[in-house]
Amino acid sequence: MIYKSFDIEELYPQLKKAENKPRLYAYLRELSPNIGDGENQRYPVMVVLPGGGYSYTSDREADPVALQYFAASYHTFILRYSCDPDRYPTALLQVMATIHYIRTHADELHADPERVFVVGFSAGGHLAACAGTLWKDPVVQGTLGCDAKLCRPTGMILGYARINGGHDPWCRSYDRLLGPEATQEQVDSLSLQNRVDEDTCPAFLWHTFTDPVVTVEDSLIFALAMRKAGVPCEMHIYPLGGHGLSVCNKQSAKGGVDAQIVPYIEGWMDLSIRWLGLFEK
């Protein structure tokens, strides 16, 4: 394993300087003459976006997730994106810059530029879904000054993702993302079921039926929007379980919180890795 960290604002000076400084952490697989194509090996990439209600980025949805995809032969990057008081589109542009960096440095990183995925949870799931739906928004190309297609994820994995800001009184994450004075028009524009079109990237979604924080309707309406747009989507809804489950085992559970260890739901990780196999050459 090769471990690196990056200052994404230093790599992309055109990004607006954030009050909460972002940081990008990478776990890169080492080349071996006895593995794959040796020096010519190119690994797919997973960019991990932890949740935290746009207030912080959760440790429980960072390393525990990244290391499982790393074990499945992915380079993994964890983006500790900027949260409150930094507002939209700060975090989205940081994700777009991350994907652009990986693609434009694919030879150096021994990465496969055609397989760069995002995985996000809760508010991080919203951010991942923003990347998958808003990659061609003029603000992306206008800020980064690049071909927007270089910022489009190959696919997105959304765990109990916040999608809709318009129906839930618990939805403080939109206040932190847009500011407390956000208009309904702004909220609607980032209620991402409204932004799905034929250019949205394919998705793998999972949620629990009883999630008390981000209700399962968020995933359902997003999947329905993808269906209407003709974009491939796989979705798993588990009958029981709370919010913030991450990888659902001791690797991500807080001590003494048994509700975060759910072997039945833990299988979402293996299912997502199998789904990623659809993109193999």
Image (cartoon, rainbow, N blue to C red):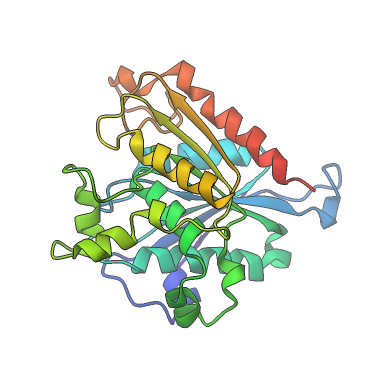
What residue is drawn where x is 36% and y is 41%?
218
Residue 64 versus residue 156: which sits nearer the camera?
156
Quarter location, residue 115: bottom right
Location of residue 15 by image quarter: bottom left
- Residue 126 relative to residue 180: left or right: right
Q: Is residue 165 left or right of residue 116?
A: left
Residue 240 location in percent, x, y? Answer: 36, 19
Give me the residue at 51% from left, 70% from top.
Answer: 136
User: In this rendering, does residue 220 appear at all?
Assistant: yes
Image coordinates of residue 172 in percent, x first then y, are 19, 49
Where residue 94 sits: x, y (%)? 43, 66
Note whether 14 is above or below 130 in the view shown. Answer: below
**Residue 249 seen in the current view:** no
Q: Is residue 3 left or right of residue 138?
A: right
Q: Residue at x 63, y 52 (%)?
A: 45
Residue with the most extreme front position: 228
Instruction: Give the percent coordinates (x, y) of residue 99.
Output: 56, 63
Q: Nearer the viewer, residue 209 or 15?
A: 209
**How many numbered marks does the figure carry?**
0
Q: Outermost residue, left direction?
A: 181
